[in-house]
Amino acid sequence: MSPPLPELTTRMRDIFGLVVEAYLDRGQPVGSKTLTHAVNLSPASIRSVLAELEGRGLLTHPHTSAGRVPTESGLRLFVDGIMQSHLPSAEERATIEGQVRGRPLEEALANATAALSGLSACAGVVVAPKIERRLRQLAFVPLGQGQALAVIVGEDGSVENRVIGLPPGMTAPALGEVANYVTGRLSGLTLSEAESRLRAEMVEQRAALDQAAAELVATGLAEWREDQSARPVLIVRGQANLLDEAAAEDLERVRRLLGELEDRQEIVRLLESAREGEGCRIFIGSENRMFALSGSSVIAAPYRGSEGRVVGVVGVIGPTRLNYARIVPMVDYTAQALTRLMG
């Protein structure tokens, strides 16, 4: 836990800010000689202040270097209390808007993520709104022993397979009739709409299927819908940005981060925690369990739909040595651009 800002003297605060800014800019430990041109103090006085800041847990010595780097607590103090954010430049804003404005939603989300990744030199991520896909076709492949492989095809071309149990006496020709009924009567509907229509026809006895077959389909549609709604829709772009020149000095950390980016369920869980609040949330290093090993940071902001409700989260993932002052407003601006698109 970093000490509150009032506990730092003006001199300590100024030198601490200079150390963090120099480290974030160059990625190298910062020594007293580097600071002499910026403060009117002798190297000995600067070293004394650096030692005091280190004693308070805000700076640390990496290896045997004479310079200091900020700790995670130090970065948190800097981000929360000292950092002066810079609005995205006109060119950066135009790049983001150009990838979002007037585009279909899925294309806009992918483009915005790629643009954010390119501008920040991080991996860009976005949790997309859950969109219930529409049904195009249903088919069955009998497997024997009372089972069949159900194949559901969506209007977007997605295909899902599932092994299902069959009611006693269900034959291959009967499965064909079920598939033809669903494709002919329910095609073009969302899974929930298809289930509702089929159950209504069952109640009114208008379904051209026997009760067991109709119940099999209705239950299957409900299960597919629940699975679909529980599955996160995550777009990740720009992992290659993490393999920059600085990565060569810490390949193990980058390897861990790339491995962590494969766990999409956990990434979604982390990003979802940024839904609360109006602006960006920043997770630094071990503040989030997922990226504790790689020592990475996450900057994320929610975006809203036409009714003003949060429908997704957009952000970046990168090393703790990020230009927070530049990237935080960039992520926030991207979230605002997506909100305008969906408004």
Image: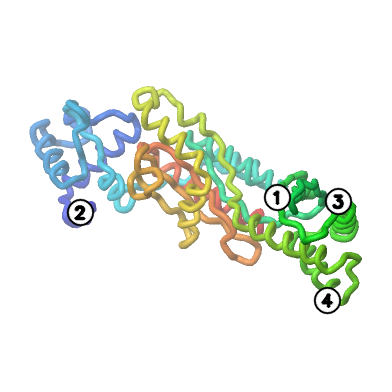
When the figure is inspected, residue 142 is found, relative to residue 65, above or below; the finding is: below
User: Which class describes the residues within 10 Å of circle 4: few (<14), some (14-19), or many (20+)?
Assistant: few
Mark 2 or mark 3: whose residue is earlier in sequence: 2
Q: Which residue is mark 3?
A: 172
- Choose between 315 and 209: the one closer to the eye: 209
Mark 1 or mark 2: whose residue is earlier in sequence: 2
Could you tell me which secondary element the residue under label 2 belongs to?
loop
When the figure is inspected, residue 87 is found, relative to residue 223, above or below; the finding is: above
Quadrant that contains the C terminus:
bottom right
Amino acid at circle 3:
Ala
Mark 3 or mark 1: whose residue is earlier in sequence: 1
- Choose between 256 and 120: the one closer to the eye: 256
Circle on res. 203: 4
Task: Provide residue 144's location: percent of width, then percent of height.
Answer: 76, 48
Mark 4 or mark 3: whose residue is earlier in sequence: 3
Q: Nearer the viewer, mark 4 or mark 1?
A: 1
Q: Which residue is mark 1?
A: 163
Task: Provide residue 163's location: percent of width, then percent of height.
Answer: 70, 50
Amino acid at circle 4:
Val
Amino acid at circle 2:
Pro
Q: Which residue is mark 2?
A: 3
Q: CA distance from mark 3 to mark 1?
A: 15 Å
Q: Nearer the viewer, mark 3 or mark 1?
A: 3
Residue occupying image coordinates x 82% and y 58%: 170
Left/right placement of residue 229 relative to residue 10 reads right
Q: Nearer the viewer, mark 4 or mark 3?
A: 3
Residue occupying image coordinates x 29% and y 28%: 28
